Image (tube, rainbow, N blue to C red):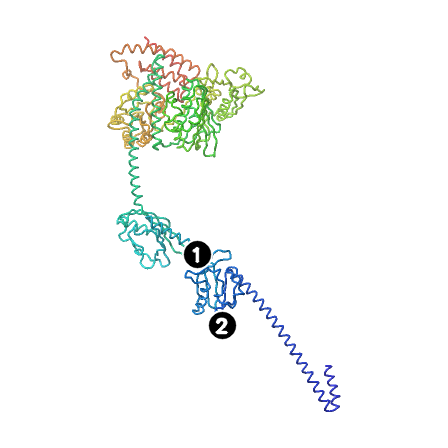
Amino acid sequence: MTLALLLSDAAAGWFDTGPIGMAVVVLAALLSLTALLALAVLRMLFLQREKLAAAERKLAQQSAAMQAQWDAVPFPVLVKDASGSYLALNRACELRLGIEPASMRGHGSLALPAQRWVPLADGSSAPQRLQQSSIDTLRENKVQRCELDYVGSDGHQRTGLLLEAPTHAPDGSVNGTIAMLLDITEYRQIERSARATEQSLRDITQRIPVVVFAVRRGDDRRQRLAFLAGNLHALFGLEHADLLEQDDVLRNWPFHDSIHPEDAPAVRRLLQRATRHRGTVTLDFRAYGAEGLRWIHLVMGTRQLSDHQVEWIGYVIDTTSINAHNQTLLAARDAAERASKAKADFLATMSHEIRTPMNGVIGMLELLGRTPLNEEQHELVHAVEDSAGVLLQVLNDVLDFSKLEAGNVRLDDAPFDLRTLIDNVAGMMTGSAHKKGLAIDIGADATLAGKLLGDSVRIRQVLMNLLNNAVKFTERGSVAVGLRVIGDDGHAQRVRISVTDTGIGIAADKQANLFTPFSQAESWTTRRYGGTGLGLAICRHLVQLMDGSIELSSRLGEGTKVTLELRLPVAQREVERPAELAGRHAIVRLASVDTANALAAHLTTLGLTVEQIPPTQPMRRGVAANLLFMDQHDQQSAAMIAAQPILVDASANGVSGPRDERLWLNTNPLKWQAVARVCAQTLKPSPASREMATPVMAPPIDAPPATGRILVAEDHPISQSLIRRQLGLLGWECDVVGDGQAALAALRQRDYAMLLTDCQMPLMNGYELATAWRQHESATQYATHLPVIAMTANALDGEIERCFEAGMDDYLSKPVQLRPLEDKLRTWAPRVTAAPKTEAGLFDDVFAEPGMEDLRAEMLQAMLKTSGPDLAKLEQALAQGDGAQAQRTLHRMLGALQLFTNGPVMVDGRELMAALGDDSGEDAWRRLPGYLERLRAALSGLAT
């Protein structure tokens, strides 16, 4: 505005001055306008320069970002122009290949440094191959690929896969290439390893008669051979091409006549089943190979692949030699089984042939021992009995070991009372131990269950063997049996039973061989003590059968301890005990700590509360108890407390129960049953409680009547005479026949209370007899079940099983002895009142034959001579309430008296003797005094 005004003012002035002034004004205006235009142009140039700088900066940023992304690619990337010169390389080219990107721009592949590249197999260099790849890509306008080996930055050779693709201008023309080098080293290593494995498999299958295959079924449902290795020609006489229809497609049935006609249907069925079912299938079949007929074993499995395809993988192997070997083994097995059967048959025969005369020897010795004999004769009889027992034990050991060796021993588990079992086993060994002056100690854990589940017969056999060894090899001291519960899971108890002696002991170097058959520690022990050396071997086998363990520890001159551990299921947790003992209190005041502890455990089991007060400790004031157990020489303790005293006697051959108007408990050995009986007698003194009867197995519900006769089927004359006399001693009359047919006829003619039958008899054996009678009972709907008891001289387990399968109820092992026979009679034919016929005409007088009068008179005098002491023993037993002594003495007297009479005194005596051992004992005690008077009268009658 100022300039305009100035110009206006100037112009006005100049216009006033004339033309020259006007010219000056115009020139000035033009100069001013030019200056303004110049300034505008400069301004525009400045603005354009700023825009260009911003664009360059943005381009540089984009270029840097692109380069960063380019360099982030982990594998080399190379870009070339149409002439084959490098335009760009990423950082991976330098890191992996040692190529400097800046140095290679504008240069071709031939300028690459060759030291990092491994020459190709044809001798050309890797740069040459890269150059040729670029040329081929530009010419063919498609992706090119090749593999190149190079040395990586770590110095190890690597394998790369080069992929080079063409780049295009906007008009679609090829203007360069871009290449990538991928590291495929690990893939090639895996591939080479797989190829090496495959080749190894092919090499192996070419050297052994096996073919490995894999078959796949794709979406087209056609089966294709994916893999095959092995000598197909050797197994099937076929070549690889014979299996294929075209390419890798399998023929429908390529085997034609290669598979044996008898086996081809089975192979077809197997293959068809494999196509429908998953899993593994196997088959053995025959096929014709290059060398003729072969045995082939096929194993094939099916699996589902991820792409819904199914694959069958398997192998076939030539088992001709294996099959031939198996046939040889089968033949050898059959021969071994025949030999084993022959051995078993031999053992059975020898068992029968040896036990049959042993039955007569031992049985008759037992009967002879019950007749009137003088002391010297008794000694001779006992010597023969001992020898016969040793012979029988040797026979049993050999048979048991043979059964165990052949695997013919099976366990029969049933509920049993382990305390009672140990009592009985110790009781059987008490006599022989006391003869040697040995003490027997028994201790049982109070936590032991009432009944366990196991094979009590085998456990008893093991304990008998261990106790027999302990007594046999101990000359002084004691033998102890300990029972401890070392584990309880609520369902089963783990028990530890130990047998300890103070005998001769065993040297450490000899102990390892003790469980070896026919082995003893020293040869002189066999000569001195006898035995077969099988006892411990049998024990070990039996304990192992019961899944237990047995161990031995010993020191020479100090003694031996054998420990066995068993895990036995609990059949009954509660202990059977007299009800009147629950909640009572007992004081144990004994000098022997071991005896006091063992007694306290028994009392705790019986439900009593127990307090142990040693004799060295004074009795406290105000103490009270129901029972007081004290040593027999303790004269003061009974006066200090108001309790029923029980004297503890540790002497040999002592009796538990009333004696000398006092109650006694014998602790040599300390039996569980004796403790229970004495406690019951003390707290409930009645005749019924004076003798605790041993429980027996309940008879069948449909047991025959209590009266009747027993039928005996036995073919051996001595065994016939023996069983007749044994049954007579037990108060039973019998009919004896010599074979099964006669026995079957007798059973159909009349009723019998029981059938005792030998197993091996002519015409019809015992098995056939039992089966025939059971069939008769079933056909005629017989009202009662006849008990059939086998008398077998074959101790093998198979014989016992045959007995039960034939329909027998029980068995007796020969030699048959009185006590086992009596137990079976009580079990299967219990007698409430024994009432056999007693007519004089039925009495079999053994002295009726001519010339026997003198012998009768001599035997009668001997019987009358011994009857006086026997009557005195009966009176003493009556006074003491000793049922066992009364039963034994009465048994002895009746055994001798039956030779001279079979009148009412015999019948009543047998009935009374049986009643003393069962639940009717109270009535027997009332009748016993009157019977003694009648027995004296009968003896007096015989004396006149």
> Taking 50 as reference, is 102 left or right?
left
SS at mark 1 in the image: helix
> Taking 320 as reference, is 506 left or right?
right
Quick one: which residue is furthest to the bottom in this view? Answer: 18
SS at mark 2 in the image: loop
Could you tell me residue 634's position as x and y percent? Answer: 52, 16
> Taking 324 as reference, is 112 left or right?
right
Q: Earlier in the sequence, mark 1 or mark 2?
A: 2
Disc 2 target residue: 170
Residue at image position (48%, 73%) is 171
Q: Residue type at mark 1: give it.
A: Arg
**Is the N terminus in the top left, top right, bottom left or bottom right quadrant?**
bottom right
Corner quadrant of residue 521: top left
Disc 1 target residue: 188
Can residue 798 be seen here? yes
Mark 1, residues whose alpha carbon is within 10 Å: few (<14), some, or many (≥20)?
Answer: some
Could you tell me residue 106's position as x and y percent? Answer: 51, 68
Label 1 and label 2: CA atoms lie apart by: 39 Å
Residue at image position (46%, 72%) is 173
